[in-house]
Amino acid sequence: MGLLKSSIESWILEEVKSMLNLFERSASTKKPISDDEMMFTGAVVNSLWAIVAGERNEWDGPVQPQILKKSEELFKAINRVTVTGLAFASGLRLVAPGFTGWTEIVKVVEEMKKLINVTVQKHFLNYDPDNLV
């Protein structure tokens, strides 16, 4: 467990460094950080992705990784579901799936499954029983 704990800690510290770099860039350019930069979402999703998949993405770089794009789409879809009342009246998904956001959630979840399956397949191809971390 100690090795796994140190790996998780190092992944989280890497995300903290990315956030600090984002703050420094913002301060040096005197440009405020907007919500569009997914500052906290990027760090949290990337930390979880590193723990689950063993991969780290540059979420604060010029090109946003697919897992972060899909996570952002999912958060927006969940927000829409909450606003339209689907969270409280699940039967609405049968009556007006497009309006309530149900169609969007199903689409994004399917896309995330595909992305996760690609990662799982890569791990099967690169499986090394002597290196499980």
Image (cartoon, rainbow, N blue to C red):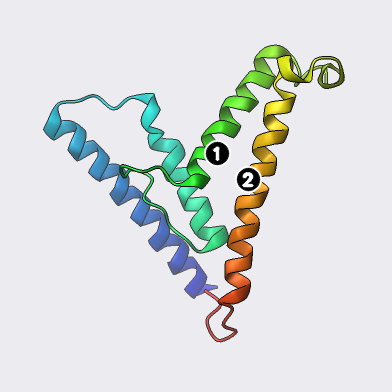
Residue 117 percent coordinates (x, y): 65, 58
Residue 103 percent coordinates (x, y): 73, 27
User: Is label 1 in a helix, a strand or a loop?
Assistant: helix
- From the image, tell me which residue sits under label 2: 112
Q: Are marks 2 and 1 in contact (CB under 8 Å)?
A: yes
Residue visible at 69% across and 31% down in the picture: 105
Q: Tell me, for residue 13, which label it has, or none.
A: none
Outermost residue to the left:
28
Is residue 118 shown above or below 6? above
Q: Amino acid at mark 2?
A: Met
Which comes before the other along the chain, label 2 or label 1?
1
Residue 63 percent coordinates (x, y): 36, 43
- State the CA–CA distance, disc 2 to disc 1: 8 Å
Residue 41 percent coordinates (x, y): 46, 37
Asked whether, in this view, residue 47 is left or right of residue 63, the answer is: right
Is residue 2 shown above or below 101? below
Residue visible at 43% across and 41% down in the picture: 42
User: Is label 2 in a helix, a strand or a loop?
Assistant: helix
Q: Tell me, for residue 71, which label it has, or none.
A: 1
**Residue mark closest to the camera, 2 vs 1:** 2
Asked whether, in this view, residue 122 is left or right of residue 39, the answer is: right
Residue visible at 57% across and 26% down in the picture: 76
Q: Amino acid at mark 1?
A: Ser
Is residue 109 shown above or below 94? below
Asked whether, in this view, residue 94 is left or right of residue 17, the answer is: right
The part of the image, by quadrant, that contains residue 70 is top right
Quadrant including the N terminus: bottom right
Outermost residue to the bottom:
130
